[in-house]
Amino acid sequence: DTEVTQTPKHLVMGMTNKKSLKCEQHMGHRAMYWYKQKAKKPPELMFVYSYEKLSINESVPSRFSPECPNSSLLNLHLHALQPEDSALYLCASSQNPSGRSESPLHFGNGTRLTVT
Amino acid sequence: SQQGEEDPQALSIQEGENATMNCSYKTSINNLQWYRQNSGRGLVHLILIRSNEREKHSGRLRVTLDTSKKSSSLLITASRAADTASYFCATGSYNQGGKLIFGQGTELSVKP
């Protein structure tokens, strides 16, 4: 079990659906991340929230919309996705933004998303 | 963008043998981290080495860093079947402003 909890574990959605992925951590971490991972590939950074503010958006299409309601929660709202968006979506947190300090990332177990 | 290149891409060994994985990167870094990922799970942080360090140990793990060659290696000694996983290096840099850039990964299979 990890200290970062992601729900749901699996999600199947059609291209016209709207859904949300949720992530929660109670470690007091001030940075939270969304990564996308395709099979047999490394995680690709999508968004970074630092102190509840969006600090990095890696040119992600607007059909993905992140939200950080408070320091413990991170959401990823999905709308009008494409089949190629099917992937494992990983949430992570760190004490401080990882590139600026030595804070390791703590990952959740991900949401396996399938877009039909 | 992905900074790290890892080799080998896949490694298959017998239990009890040592496993060595290599990581090369392109830009200057402040630290380099190694992560493990079991199939279908999230990544787990293994070890961090700072740019001013050359070697670090943690249990059966030994990490080296050569900043002049922009490379790092991860050695797992006396491997176990439970070490079967994908291993990723990741680089952190102030220039990357909060991003941790992952390498392509090595898929390790340890046969009992």
Image: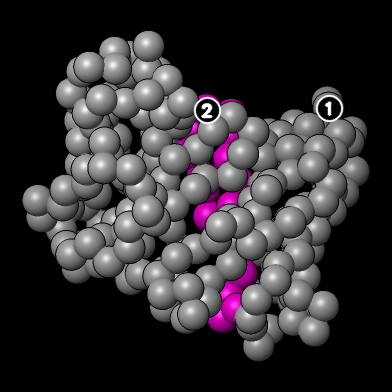
**Quadrant position of residue A48:** bottom left
**Corner quadrant of residue B53:** bottom right
Chain of the residue on which disc 1 is drawn: B
Amino acid type of disc 2?
Gly
Disc 2 target residue: B40
Magenta segment boundaries in residue numbering: B29-46
The amino acid on which the numbered mark 1 sits, given as a three-letter code, is Lys
Residue at (35, 47) in percent of width and height: A60
Neighbor class of circle 1 (other Cα within 10 Å; few <14, some 14-19, many 20+) is some
- The percent position of residue B59, horizontal first and vertical second, equals 68, 59
Quadrant hosting residue A109 = top left
The subunit carrying tag 2 is B
Between residues A103 and A17, which one lies in front from this camera angle?
Answer: A17
The residue located at (90%, 43%) in the rendering is: B17
Measured along the vertical axis of the image, is residue B5 above or below residue B91?
above
Q: Residue furthest left?
A: A69
Q: Is residue B103 above or below residue A31?
A: above
Q: Residue at x 27, y 66 (%)?
A: A55
Whether residue A30 is visible to the viewer of this picture, yes or no, is no
User: Residue B1 lies in magenta, yes or no?
Assistant: no
Secondary-structure class at tag 2: loop
Residue B40 on the magenta span: yes
Please tell me the numbered disc located at residue B111: 1
- Where residue A79 sits: x, y (%)? 22, 28
Q: Position of residue A95 (x, y in %)?
A: 32, 67
